[in-house]
Image (spheres, helix red, strand yellow):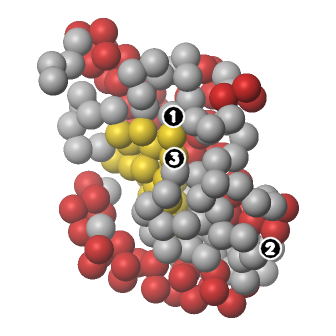
């Protein structure tokens, strides 16, 4: 399928803008500039009880044909004890709940919402792609093994961040 120049321009602008945004715990990567998928690596978060201290999590943000008018879909690719693996998650402002979404939030804002999923895991309740009753011991265990998981099971994506 050929990518129209409009889509290439839109994705190029989105990714160029991401390079200008700086959060110490978030890094962005993509396979090709015309790919509608942005990978986000989150590391260095603490959490209320330091449950994420050693964690490194990779999320996939998929920008559909109508992005930025409609929100992207997000899934977390690294086991974390909060979200189901490789399942699009449903929280406010992601693809399943577009009523609270604004195009101005951008991918950087969506990335911050992914961080909020981790930081506010106790308040999330239920939703598509979320684990029904997260356990802090499982979250800590997932954090401990997350880097090795990424280098073993998400090797190609992990290398994009190097």
Residue that mark 1 sits on: 72
Q: 10 Å neighbourhood of mark 3: few (<14), some, or many (≥20)?
A: many
- Helix or strand or loop: what does disc 1 sit on? loop
CB under 8 Å between discs 2 and 3: no
Residue that mark 3 sits on: 74
Q: Is residue 17 above or below residue 150?
A: above
Residue at (29% x, 74% y) in the render: 153
Q: 10 Å neighbourhood of mark 1: few (<14), some, or many (≥20)?
A: many
Q: Position of residue 120 (x, y in %)?
A: 78, 61
Q: Is residue 3 left or right of residue 117?
A: left
Q: Is residue 134 left or right of residue 107?
A: right
- Measured in 3D between alpha carbons, the distance from the residue under mark 1 to the one under mark 2, in whole angstroms, is 28 Å
Residue that mark 2 sits on: 48
Looking at the rendering, which quadrant does residue 31 occupy? top left
- Measured in 3D between alpha carbons, the distance from the residue under mark 2 to the one under mark 3, in whole angstroms, is 24 Å
- Measured in 3D between alpha carbons, the distance from the residue under mark 3 to the one under mark 1, in whole angstroms, is 7 Å
Residue at (65% x, 62% y) in the render: 130
CB under 8 Å between discs 3 and 1: yes
Q: Position of residue 46 (x, y in %)?
A: 68, 72
Looking at the rendering, which quadrant does residue 18 occupy? top left
Q: Position of residue 74 (x, y in %)?
A: 51, 46
Q: Earlier in the sequence, mark 1 or mark 2?
A: 2
């Amino acid at each position: 399928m050929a990518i129209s120049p409009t889509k290439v321009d839109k994705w190029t602008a989105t990714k160029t803008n991401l390079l200008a945004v700086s959060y110490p715990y978030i890094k962005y990567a993509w396979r090709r500039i015309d790919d509608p998928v942005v990978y986000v690596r989150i590391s260095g978060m603490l959490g209320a009880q330091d449950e994420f201290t050693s964690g490194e999590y990779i999320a996939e943000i998929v920008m559909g044909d109508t992005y930025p008018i409609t929100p992207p879909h997000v899934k977390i690719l690294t086991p974390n004890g909060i979200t189901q693996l490789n399942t699009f998650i449903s929280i406010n402002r992601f693809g399943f709940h577009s009523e609270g979404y604004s195009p101005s939030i951008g991918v950087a804002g969506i990335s911050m919402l992914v961080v909020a999923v981790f930081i506010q895991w106790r308040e999330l309740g239920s939703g598509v792609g979320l684990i029904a009753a997260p356990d802090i011991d499982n979250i800590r265990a997932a954090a401990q093994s997350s880097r090795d998981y990424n280098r073993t099971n998400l090797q190609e994506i992990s290398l994009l961040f190097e």
